[in-house]
Image (cartoon, coloured by chain):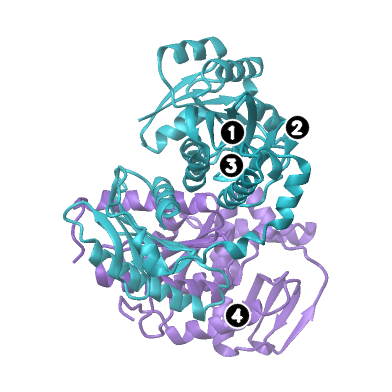
Chain colours: A purple, B cyan
Amino acid sequence: MTGETTNIDAAGLSEAIELLEHIESLPSTATGALSFGDDGVILLQNRRICWAVAASMPKRLTDILCQQKNPPLPRAAMEALFKQCKESGLPIGEALVSSGLLSEGELRKALAFHNGEAVSRIARARRRPTGFLPHSKTGYDARFVFQAVELLAQIAAAREPLDTHGATATLLGTLVAGATGFAFLRDGERGRPTVLAVDQACELRVSEALEIGCWSSRLFDVTSFFDPTTSVASATWCNNTSIVTWRDGRVSYAAVCSSRPASTLLVSQLAKRARANDPAVHPQVRP
Amino acid sequence: MIKILAVEPGQGGVLAQVLAAFHLDFDTIHTSNFERSLEQLRERAFEAVVVDVTLGDDAWKLLAWLQKERPHVGRFALLPEDSAELRVRVADLGVIDCMVEPFDATDVLVQLTSGLAETCFGFLHNINLPAFLQLLEIERKTCTLRAESAGRSGRMFISRGEMLDARVDGVSGEAAAFAIIGWLSGNVHVEHGCFVAERTLQKPISHLLMSALQYRDEAGLNGSADGDIDEMSFRRLQESLVPLKSELPPVPRLPSFLARLPKTMTLFHGSLGLALVDAETGLTLAAEAKPPIDMIQWAESAATVLRQEYATLATSSQDTDLMELVVTTGSCCELIKPLPKRPRCFALLLFDPDETNLVMARIEVDRWVNEHA
């Protein structure tokens, strides 16, 4: 495989992928605590990750929440709110958002950071859980629970913050209604992509996202052999599902479209953008 | 330039804005009531009128006026919801297709362009009816034929090149189709749309023609040269016909199919090259391109990309066939479309996205494939 390689700690990422794929192999109704002995615990709600904590974590969620703002939130205000919540039984997330201290997006970002870090540390310490304690309560706010692939992106993002910031903005700014997707970097050593950013509505499993990333890389390898200016490609199958893939610098993107109009609109927009960025827009003989 | 009158409430009109956003060859004029629409229709020649039925009486009056005064103009309706009752009502007024809120820009575009492409209208004097029916099948046209011959009149309902129903002298279905085809020639009024409550015919037009002409020949031998029909003779004919499928020639193999390909291919506005390619070898079977495009090179590379996709599909969890690939380069867009009926081949279209778009490219490729491949 050709293309750029990344500086990501590939071994650490592989362990996280293995753990997240294990979570995705559980039944879709899996709700409860996935225990990793003394190394940590991951709480699941309908197979989605609501909370994770690792024994070796250096930062508490309070620290992360405080640092979400610039200037940072006063620690005293945060702790007072925690105390109120403890007394009233109000979930801390709701309290933070309703008090105006954090927006919904900021809280989600902080939780993703915290959970991603925890999953990464647990995976490095122990790849398989020691037990699963199911429970029937599903009290976590659906806005603040995560797909495995989202946390995978979060883990990689912690290592590639510059690429991730731009990739997230590009991804969300490009997707159209009926399309969902992710951004990724090619990983030359491991032969599989590194998911950098994921649209919140993306329902792909980790293995599916990796398969799509590989497909995109192979497609660009072949098309670029004939024409290095290839920037957008899409494939549509007879069930009307389409995958549109494009690249911008060293970051690649893939969008899964549930309808032909969605993929058509996306391809048209991307083609226009590609042409606008390329001054040599007149047809030419293929090299 | 396709001239469209969009009759919608409010200023500017949603549809007019949608069409403008695509920068296509549409000249859209917006009106919001019956009187202004009539003024425009009397001043200009429009190819299509799109009427929002939420305008109420103005919408219904306008559709009725169009049916009577401008029957050749393609008519489309914008519906606030997908209601069977509304669809029947607008269909009775000759509407070709309905667009339902919320509007999807691309869907609207496809419906308008394909609706206009499929429809036809006119009066044909003393035409060879079987030949004309074959043409409608090949072109996948949608229309209703009113055929007249020797003081008799019959109707045939054709949707996308398939005959759904035929009616004559109180008889419908195959008997009616056979009777009308048996007239062989006469005057034909081609009307917009195809509105039938129930499909009575299942066979392709070519099969119906073969059966009808066979029947006519047999009737001629028996002294009834006008090919007219009665219930008993129709039943006898049905019994005597061997299953049509086995009589038909097999699907042509590649050599004879190639022989039917046109020597030259017409490029539509915005296209840079069109080719039919053998996927296994990358050989170009037929091609046309604007200089300096070398379609042979493009075809070879497209075949390589497609072969890789097939290889990927073979090893992946996908259990569905590839319908199309689109590749955008710095110089143009490339539409690669495997032919479902000819798995060895694919159509390759190169187009300039500044001049046309993917929707139009798909329509043109589909049209070309239906005609020739």
Residue B170 - label? 2
B10, above or below B127, in the image: above
Amino acid found under the numbered disc labelled 4: Glu
Question: Label 4 lies in what chain?
Answer: A
- Name the residue that disc number 3 marks: B159
Relative depth, front residue between A59 and A204: A204
For residue A27, above or below residue B112: below
Chain letter behind tag 1: B
- Specify whether disc 3 shares its chain with disc 2: yes
Which secondary structure lies at badge 2?
loop
Q: Identify the residue position indicated by label 1 in the image.
A: B144
Q: Secondary structure at mark 1?
A: strand
Residue B270 seen anywhere in this rendered image of the structure:
yes
State which tag comes first along the sequence, 3 or 2: 3
Which residue is identified by label 4?
A21
**Mark linked to residue B153:** none
